[in-house]
Image (cartoon, helix red, strand yellow):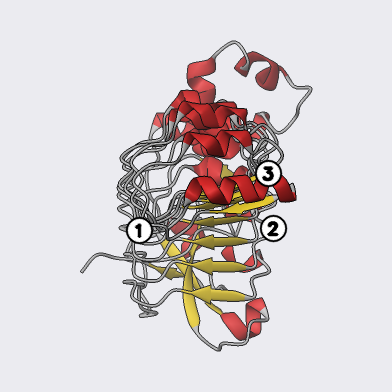
Amino acid sequence: MANNLVIRALKANSKSFNLSSKKMTEVPKSVARLTHILTLHLNNNSLTSLPVELQTLRNLTELNLGNNSLDEVPSVLRYLNTLKKLYLFGNHITRLPPEVLDGLDNLTLLNLNHNHITVLPPEIKSLSNLETLSLLDNQLEELPVEIGFLKKMVEMNLTNNKLSRLPKQIYSLSQLARLYLARNNLTELPEGVIGLMKLRVLDVAGNRLSMFPVDFQLLTLNELLCEGNTFVKNKLMESVQAVEVLSLKELSARRILVEDKSRLGVVHRALSYHPGLSLLLADWGRCSLCLQPFLTTWLECVRFINLRKDMKMSRPQTVPVRVLLCSYKCFNKSGHSYYGVASV
């Protein structure tokens, strides 16, 4: 039957070929004769592999392999470098072979929903044109830092995985508009969220977040889904400590950070010769009150943001946003609306 369909497609010079829901366990090699097709649908079958002959489909831009029985990404895909859309949802895939990713640099959409993938290889950075990445319902425990190389990413769906943290490089995705992180194990979002200035939809429902990162209120979100988290409550806590004794390390770090503001200064030039010190100082913060830099956050603080009033969203919900303060001295100043967070 499939061979008859191939013959018809050849005669009609069709640009699309559909073998979905044909109860196939293998793809007929005759499909390789359809070198002119742009779209190939092989979804809803029982395929466990693809024949190497399909590498002749050098004009193919869309391939649907969803709902099959694939245990791995077919190696023949590495030769189909014209592919722009690849659907592999509903299979039994556990990994992404680096050698296949290297051949898919024109891909704009990759759908791997409902598989068993535990890790993304560093070679994910090869997908430099990727705009949509969907890994809903997998077993991902972490993302590689190389995710930050996908500069064209517009939508990322990581719902229902096992992520406990995100790399801060995710904030390099300056074009990202929709980020779905629901039903993971996230306890925090990394600092630097202001890098996602085009983000419009954020779904973090069903995690274990206690607050949102610094400057979260500056995002121009249209939709925020955050139900099912363990956010801190706005119960006022006053400091019982007026002044703290800073360590020599902290005093030195603050001095260096102040001096490093001058890009023409001696300290800034000297830091380039001390990569270890530069790495140590990389996670510095700026006090929200005195605006001075510091290395160690002495007191966890939050401010409470009303989504409707402060972020112009439709919902009136209030959420906690992390605030950086350099000392109890600043915290004890009057006139601010920051709350200290204490473990009880």
Report the disc number at residue 137: 1
- Which residue is drawn at the image coordinates 43% and 43% (left, top)? 296
Q: Tell me how far mark 1 sits from mark 2, CA to CA.
A: 27 Å
Q: Amino acid at mark 2?
A: Met
Mark 2 = which residue?
A: 197
Give the SS element for disc 2. loop
Quadrant of the frame with the C terminus: bottom left
Residue 114, placed above or below residue 219: above
Circle nearer the N terminus (1, 2)? 1
Query: Which of 96 and 295 lies nearest the eye of the viewer?
Result: 96
Residue 280, placed above or below residue 301: above
Left-right relation of 232 to 59: left
Q: Give coordinates of residue 154: x percent, y percent.
A: 65, 54
Please name which of the two marks, 1 or 2, marks the residue nearer to the observer: 1
Give the SS element for disc 3. helix
Circle nearer the N terminus (3, 1)? 3
- Which residue is drawn at the image coordinates 68% and 49% (left, top)? 174
Q: Amino acid at mark 1?
A: Asp
Q: Give coordinates of residue 11: x percent, y percent.
A: 71, 47
Mark 3 = which residue?
A: 10
Contact between marks 3 and 2 (CB within 8 A): the answer is no
Query: Which of 293 and 140 lies nearest the eye of the viewer?
Result: 140
Report the disc number at residue 128: none
Query: Which of 337 and 115 lies nearest the eye of the viewer?
Result: 115
Q: Give coordinates of residue 71: x percent, y percent.
A: 30, 40
Q: Is residue 62 visible?
A: yes
Q: Tell me how far mark 3 sits from mark 1, CA to CA.
A: 38 Å
- Which residue is drawn at the image coordinates 58% and 76% (left, top)? 223
- Which residue is drawn at the image coordinates 56% and 51% (left, top)? 5
Q: Amino acid at mark 3?
A: Leu
Q: How many marks?
A: 3
